Image (cartoon, rainbow, N blue to C red):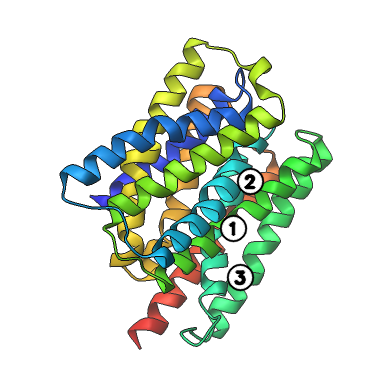
Amino acid sequence: MAFAIVYLVWGSTYLAIRIGVHDAPPILFAALRFLIAAPLLLGYAWLRGARLPAAGRDWAVIGFTSLLMLVGGNGMVTWAEQWVQSNQAALIVATSALWMAGFGTLGTKGERLGRGTLAGLVVGFLGVAVLVGDGLRLGSAPWPAYLLLIVSPVLWAGGSVFARRYPVGCAPPMTAALQILIAGVVQFVLGLAVGERSRWQWTPEVIGSLLYLAVFGSCIAFGAYYWLVHEVKPAQLATYAYVNPAVAVLLGWLVLGERLSAMQAAGTAIILVSVIAVTLASRRATEH
């Protein structure tokens, strides 16, 4: 059930973000999404018996992973989707699975990369180069938007691996709720600081996408993802990275009429094949 939620809901969030930032400034939009979600998830965690962490070390880990995954990783995607189509954003973010495999080799608990995994990583990044290069050639989005999309999965993967290496003493729903709350507060202050308040518009599209992202994307799907981080192997967890883009591409086409050029379609195929190959190679390595 947790995998199904992450697969389907997160695959649709790229579309919801794209719709929302059409009328709303991206940083405040992301902040309000989290500030709506945080009390809901905090209440759920408290009712389930979860309590706030007692150790300062736990607060530090929660804060650090929130900055990496939500403020950095998710925030960059939200900002970039002002220009980049939701299908392209989802495909580039799919490389988080490649970065997870790479970061998994670091430290004393790191696992050595096999030849198949290493080859998959190289091919995957080649696919990103093809996808982004053709997007820049067509002038569909400014280069800083693509740059942030490339950096976003690096931060997300780094935060995921760090969270797995340094588990905290409170239950996953409480941990996820605190991460969301911290990200919402940080982004709200940042959005006000850069003057986004004057650009805010309450439209039906903004309200609908905010509520969907807050309840389904942040409360339900992020809670399910953070539970999976501690319950399954990284190779299994990384499978969401090639299901989400498929859902996003389909929804982008059905709802917004998004299209991929021939070169972008080739880059898409390269990325998805490489992510699947890396995931399967990692799984075989852990089984042996």
Horizontal relation, residue 216 to residue 186: left or right: left
Within-10-Å neighbours for mark 1: few <14, some 14–19, many 20+: many
Residue 81 in view here: no
Q: Quadrant of residue 98?
A: bottom right
> x and y percent of residue 88 in the render?
62, 41
Q: In the displayed structure, would residue 216 be above or below residue 22?
A: below
> x and y percent of residue 271 in the render?
59, 57
**N-term-proximal mark, 3 vs 1:** 3
The residue that appears at 25% across and 38% down in the rendered structure is 43
1 or 2: mark nearer the eye: 1
3 or 1: mark nearer the eye: 1
**Residue position marked by numbered label 1 in the rendering:** 155
> x and y percent of residue 252 in the render?
53, 31
Q: CA distance from mark 2 to mark 3?
A: 19 Å
Within-10-Å neighbours for mark 3: few <14, some 14–19, many 20+: many
Q: In the displayed structure, would residue 168 be above or below residue 244?
A: below
Q: CA distance from mark 1 to mark 2?
A: 25 Å
Screen quadrant of the C terminus: bottom left
> x and y percent of residue 130 in the render?
73, 53
Tell me the number on the disc at residue 265: 2
Closest to the observer, 184 or 58: 58
- In the image, what residue type sits under mark 3? Leu
Tell me the number on the disc at residue 121: 3
Closest to the observer, 41 or 99: 41
Find numbered disc 2 in the image and state the secondary structure of the residue it sits on: helix
Q: In the displayed structure, would residue 20 be above or below residue 276?
A: above
2 or 3: mark nearer the eye: 3
Q: In the displayed structure, would residue 57 be above or below residue 9?
A: below
The residue that appears at 55% across and 28% down in the rendered structure is 29
Within-10-Å neighbours for mark 2: few <14, some 14–19, many 20+: some
Q: CA distance from mark 3 to mark 1?
A: 17 Å
